[in-house]
Image: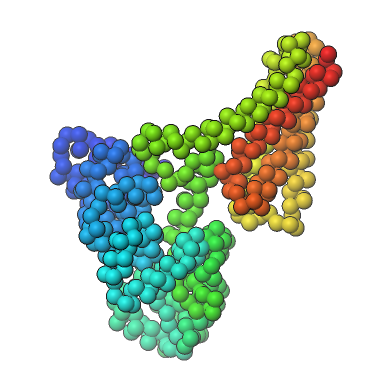
Amino acid sequence: MEAREHTQGNLQLLREQLDSGRMRSARLMVHSLHPAEIARLLESLPLQERAALWEMVSADDEGDVLVELSDEVRDGLIQGMQTEELIAATAGMDFDDLADLLADLPEAVTRQVLQSLDKLDQDRLQQVLAYDEDCAGGLMNIDIVTVRPDVTLEVVMRYLRAVGDMPDGTDLLFVVNRDNEYVGSLFLSRLLTHDPDTLVSGIMSTDVLPIPAHTPSRQVVWEFENRDLLSAPVVDDDYRVVGRITVDDVVDVIRDEAEHSLMSAAGLDEEDDMFAPVFKSARRRALWLGINLGTAFLAASVVDLFQSAIDKIVLLAVLMPVVPSMGGVAGTQSLVIITRAMALGQVDKTNATRILKKELAVGLLNGLGWSIVVATFTYLWFGDWRIGGVIAAAMIINLFIAALSGFGIPVLLKQMRIDPAIAGGVVLTTVTDVVGYMTFLGLGAALLL
């Protein structure tokens, strides 16, 4: 909350300075901000003001700011930069950040950036690029400090003083053997508080387990969350240490996953630019509007099958939206819970049946409870127990089907390699609408005519 208010305050102040022509004050303000704060401001400004702000960003900060931006905003800024400027922006960047940025640079610029690095740095960068960006190898930073288990703490301290600098966020050193295979971890707190003559092997920890480089990013998040890690070593298939992941990398993954879930629910991309041209944004959103229109016509065709019943019993038309609406809400609740559980790895073959039975029981119980309420309200409104009975029966059926669909749809989409967060809501709405109209109008036609 405080961070959001701080960003909003900076945005308002910056706009006031730009509107009043106080460019020097605006430039000083921009230079005092962290690259991540500048990135948030850039994403919050229309295209013209964004260009003015980008010109104020220091050349030393441009690379760090580009890494923090969403893909679409970053692409827009890169298109307006000269090759020499892009190469300068990449100078001094961490290799994991540089690898992320290179994916968005023109191929010619990428080649020149690689040529500007010495042979050692080229090899180190290629090491990061060899892994998919959504796995531990793609998240890792290869700037690490390793020590041997058979040396004393005094030797380690002398080595660190000779090196001078340690990578940011270092809370432990990785202990490796002569083949660079992971043996354990040496916490800096132990290094500083134990006798200098103590061997590293005597106080190193073997509880910090390494993360294989091909581990999916979601699993990396789980490891950090459940093991309370601040950093962890990354190893290749031969158990050799190739890098490390720190908690700030994991926070980025969590944020990206949260944005993905939120935007995907509406069929949108979390990387979309809020200030993209109107036609471009409209074209993107049109796809899911078209899909929704198709499902709406499907539901309408079901209603049309019972047109004669609706003509004879007008009250059916009045109450018709109730059953699909209740089913949609109940199904969405199950869908969200199951989709989240699948993302966290909490659903597998051993517990799937038990989870399904629980969701069906919840759907049935809610269906029974609310059907009594709706039937009573309908009777008091229209004075006809038959209509109350029809809507009650339809609601029980639809809430039961909604619970079944809320469990089954994300499981089925996952097997089809489709993200449930994107397509689950559309499919579920179609099912609950069709079943809701079919049961309500079908029962009404059968029992009331």
The image quadrant where one finds the C terminus is top right
Please name the residue shown 36% across and 53% down the image.
68
Is residue 180 visible to the viewer in this orientation of the structure? yes
How many numbered badges does the structure rendering display? 0
Please name the residue shown 43% across and 59% down the image.
248
Residue 121 x %, y % = 33, 74
Please name the residue shown 26% across and 62% down the image.
87
Please name the residue shown 48% across and 72% down the image.
233
Q: Residue 62 lies in what quarter of the image? A: bottom left
Indicate the colouring scheme. Answer: rainbow
Depth check: give the residue in front, 234 or 100. 100
Q: Residue 359 lies in what quarter of the image? A: top right
- Residue 323 position (above or below residue 315): below
Residue 360 x %, y % = 76, 41
Residue 180 x %, y % = 47, 83
- Residue 300 position (above or below residue 6): above
Depth check: give the residue in front, 226 or 124. 124
Residue located farthest toward the front when viewing the structure as drawn: 108
Is residue 32 visible to the viewer in this orientation of the structure? no
- Residue 96 position (above or below residue 159): above
The image quadrant where one finds the N terminus is top left
Depth check: give the residue in front, 199 or 208. 208
